Amino acid sequence: MSDNVAPASKPVKTTGLHIGDPAPGVKKVDPIIIADGVKRTFGGLTAVDVAHVEIPRGAITALIGPNGAGKTTFFNLLTGFDKPDEGKWEFDGRSLAHVPAYRVARMGLIRTFQLTKALGLLTVLDNMKLGAKQQTGENLFRSVLPFLWRKQEEEIEEKAKEILTRFKLDAKQEDYAASLSGGQRKLLEMARALMSDPTLVMLDEPMAGVNPALTQSLLDHILDLKSQGMTVLFVEHDMHMVRHIADWVIVMAEGKIVAEGDPHEVMQDPAVIDAYLGAHHDTDLGDSDDEHVTAMKELIDDEQ
Amino acid sequence: MESTQAVRPHSRGRWLILLGLLLSALTLSGIAASPAMADEGGTDGQAEEFEYFFSGNVKYNDEPLEGVSISVSGGGFEAETETDENGQWTLGVPEKEAYELTLDEDTLPEGVIVEDGQSTIEAEFGLTNRKAVNFFLGEGQRVTTDYGAQVLIRVVNGLNFGLLLALAAIGLSLIFGTTGLSNFAHAEMITFGALMMLTFSTTLAFPVWLAIIIAIALSGGLGWALDAGLWKPLRKRGVALIPLMIVSIGLSLALRYTFQFFYGGGTRQLPGATIPSEIRLGPILLSWIDVVSMATSVVVLLAVAFFLLRTRIGKATRAVSDNAPLAAASGIDVDRVIRIVWILGGALAGLAGILWAYFRPGVSWDMGFQILLLVFAAVTLGGLGTAFGALVGSLIVGLFIEVSTLWLPSDMKYVGALLVLILVLLFRPQGILGRRERIG
Amino acid sequence: MIDFLAILGNAAQQLISPTTAAYALAALGLAIHFGYTGLLNFGQAGFMALGAYGFAISTLSFGFPVWASVLVGIAASIVFALILGIPTLRLRADYLAIVTIAAAEILRLIFTTNTFDEVTGSASGLQGYKGGIAALNPIPDGTYGFGPFTYNAYDWWIRILGWTVVILAAIFTWLLMRSPWGRVIKGIREDEDAVRALGKNVYSYKMQSLILGGVFGTLAGMIFILPRAVVPANYQTSLTFFIYAILLLGGAATILGPIVGAMIFWVLLSFFSGFVSRAVEAGWFPFMSPVQAGQLTFILVGVGIMLLVVFRPQGIFGNKKELAFVR
Ligand SMILES: Nc1ncnc2c1ncn2[C@@H]1O[C@H](COP(=O)(O)OP(=O)(O)OP(=O)(O)O)[C@@H](O)[C@H]1O
Ligand SMILES: [Mg+2]
């Protein structure tokens, strides 16, 4: 199984990201995001309760955890799509409390969604162009005077085509996004996120539902982002992928950060095994959790 | 604070409006109420020396009232006249200006008053030299009621209205919860109940209790038929929610005018709608119909609550509202639940229609549409798709509408309720008992 | 016997009637709301009422010149859009629907109540505001035209005026929708969270769209009252539903759709009601009265809306691929 997605060459891992022993909430040398006491409850359920976490800059960080651990909710909180009950968090030294989602995006923090949000009745190219920042023609009054924005539009189009070519979607550029396959939509969403030259890209399960043939190219794209100087934070259930490309792993369970560390070491942390197996014991919604457990066991075997 | 106020049993007064307002010429069937029109070309009477005339027609229960004194004043001019044997009056005035016209309530028969204390009306001429001025008469006693008692009266009226709204709102809310449909045709399901009641009780002369049972059963049947014949096939086709909502708008339009096609544009009364109010509770005067209506609402609402909370199918209904795919996966027959919800929603709407016909009072082709927005407001206030929210929302809307007539003119009373809806959404967007959706 | 020529003539008149122009413009505004942005505005009748009353009251009560009266109407509709939009544009689409329909009813009730009779004319409405428009008429007095299209100078003038506004609005919309602004708007229709995640101020764009479409509705309301009086009963919820019918007929996310949709709608409606009422008079349908013939028209519109949505949701002009509805 693991051989299917085996890397052609081993990616270069960034190391020395943390200060002191890797433990939940460990300090980072150069954090891009710092969250403190962020808590979100839904009725009686505490979905997220993060005491302290820092995301290292210029690296690929994976956020893992069993289903319902609160990963997506944490993403929503960080990007302004949801508001925490309490806590503070900052991006690039600027506090994000009460900053609306679109401003967060303009600050350079772009996210994708677990359930892909391709804009179905726009063409693939229009989807891409929408991602570009600071467009003159997006102002109501200037938009009716095409000569004001035509030149910028051409530049954006060129950039969009270039990225689409990289993602092998150039043949589809005139099609409606609704006609793309699930995996292609994931690609499109990622490509679209790149249109704004973000500093931090947050991907919520970029691999879910993507056909294995595309997995390798997706991995390469993520690694590519790092080599271009971007920071990546992604949620993923596929442990092979995590181990393969992540420089740092943060493990969540029941809303809390239970472990942090280097991808190889963190897998051996008893807290992590506990998180997955514990989740398994507590719930009776079999299937999906079983998968994690098998994946974990497989991984732990791999390591040894 | 003291004020002169009509003690009105319920809003029957609105039906007793005599002059000018009924637009029921569209009626086909002979049994329709004959419209009392105060036409602008009434008898000329005295005052030939003037160029401009106010005129009107004073009737109560379709009987002209003779000898009612009407006076006009304004611009230093004053005059007075009395109605003739046809209840008609004319007053000439020297200028095309605004005048104040006053009906002397002391010259009205015992137990009759001018509605809403509007015995003085300010009137102005339009384009013609004649202006019809109408005083709306209602049943009641001229008594001085203190402020607290007035509030109490309105509260009771509001509860009555709110309870009947709740019957309709819960059905709408259950349908929304289980199918996601914002059903604009719910208005016509309300009207349908009242029309069936009218048909069986008045036209076919069945006993009232039997007519009510038949009308409610047929309303449930309409709910079933709509689901089986229209909504279920559309669901199977995979039509999205917004198009479905627009289909319901089309359906509402088509049904409403179908009702008008067959029943005409007039307003007709259900049997017993005009029995006098004789139950006195402190300052509050109620009729048997009010009492029975409120009691029925409460009993039916309790039964619905029992159904939702205690019965298997009720629990299944709530499960489907919560998460239809999950409910389906755990073995609940979603189609069956939806069918039952439609039947229940139809029957509740039908009952609401009958009670609304007594409350207004009167049956007309667009009576459901008149309160549709209030029902929507109630459902939205409570939080879309929560049955108990719909109940709370209805009571708030009902109470607010009646109590607000303390400050608002009665032709603006719905304005207050709709404003409250907008304000609540501003501060509690998910409604009073609703919850927020998940993102991502 | 039935005079088919007269029926056809009457129907043909609807092609260029100012009423058709008003419906076309109101539908174009709704296309911006619903077709392009995905906003469920069920209060277009309210925007039209604001145009009508804003214009008429400014003229009658304050003696404003035409241009100022038009501006007052537009300003009123902008304020209205803000009041509607601020609470609801952050919420799910169906909340906007309920709030707009409620707000339009509030307006109608306020225009109908006796309390403000001096300004609004209450239930009998307003007239006598057309002087300013008539004075601007460059066409010399007389009767012009041919066949069914024979009108006097004022009637021609309001037709020219109405359709000019429609055409200008259509061009403006066309320019907008092929610009990056239009792209954002259409993106919001597809998935507003995705657009928000790309750094667009979705709330502001929705508000701009609501205002713009509302202003179109307001201008439509002004055109609507040129051939008739201002009567509050005209601004009922069913007016909005008729405009939806036109929009769905033509195609929700198109520019020509609302315009041609309005023409087809009114020509067909006029033909149908003309035919049925004459047929009833001629005794073809002995079971029906002339009044019922009128109601049949409404029933037909209702059924038409249902059939269109189910069987041709993209309308006449809509791209088969770009179904405004599929999500
Ligand atoms: N809007 C909401 N209302 C109520 N509960 C919610 C809401 N959003 C999330 N939750 C709950 O919060 C918990 C965390 O959910 P979240 O989506 O963050 O998990 P996750 O870690 O992303 O899971 P997965 O790996 O399955 O995507 C879950 O128990 C979920 O049911
Ligand atoms: Mg998730």
Image (cartoon, coloured by chain):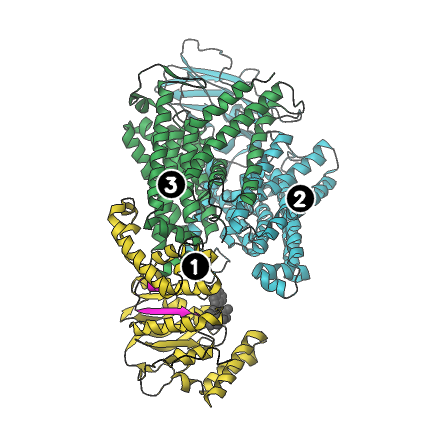
Chain colours: A yellow, B cyan, C green
Report the residue that reaches farthest toward the top: B49
The part of the image, by quadrant, that contains residue A228 is: bottom left
Q: Both on one chain, marks 2 and 1?
A: no
Is B440 situated above or below C131? below
Chain ID of residue with mark 3: C
The secondary structure type at the circle numbered 1 is loop
Quadrant position of the N terminus of chain B in the picture: top left
Q: Nearer the viewer, mark 3 or mark 1?
A: 1
Are dots 2 and 1 in contact, CB under 8 Å? no
Q: Both on one chain, marks 3 and 1?
A: no
Disc 1 Cβ-to-ligand 2 distance below 8 Å: no
Residues in magenta?
A193-207
Q: CA distance from mark 3 to mark 1?
A: 29 Å
Question: What is the tally of numbered marks visible in this picture?
Answer: 3
Which amino acid lies under the numbered mark 3 shown in the image of this protein?
A: Gly
Q: Which mark is residue A118?
A: 1
Q: Which residue is mark 3?
A: C214
Q: Nearer the viewer, mark 2 or mark 1?
A: 1
Q: CA distance from mark 3 to mark 2?
A: 37 Å
Q: Which residue: 44% across, 36% down?
A: C108
Q: Which residue is mark 2?
A: B222
Quadrant position of the C terminus of chain B in the picture: bottom left
> x, y (%) of residue C319?
46, 45
Neighbour class for label 2 at 10 Å: few (<14), some, many (≥20)? many
Q: Is residue A201 magenta?
A: yes
Which amino acid lies under the numbered mark 2 shown in the image of this protein?
A: Leu
Horizontal placement of C106 versus A31: left or right? right
Chain ID of residue with mark 1: A
Horizontal placement of B290 versus C182: left or right? right
Q: Which mark is residue C296?
A: none
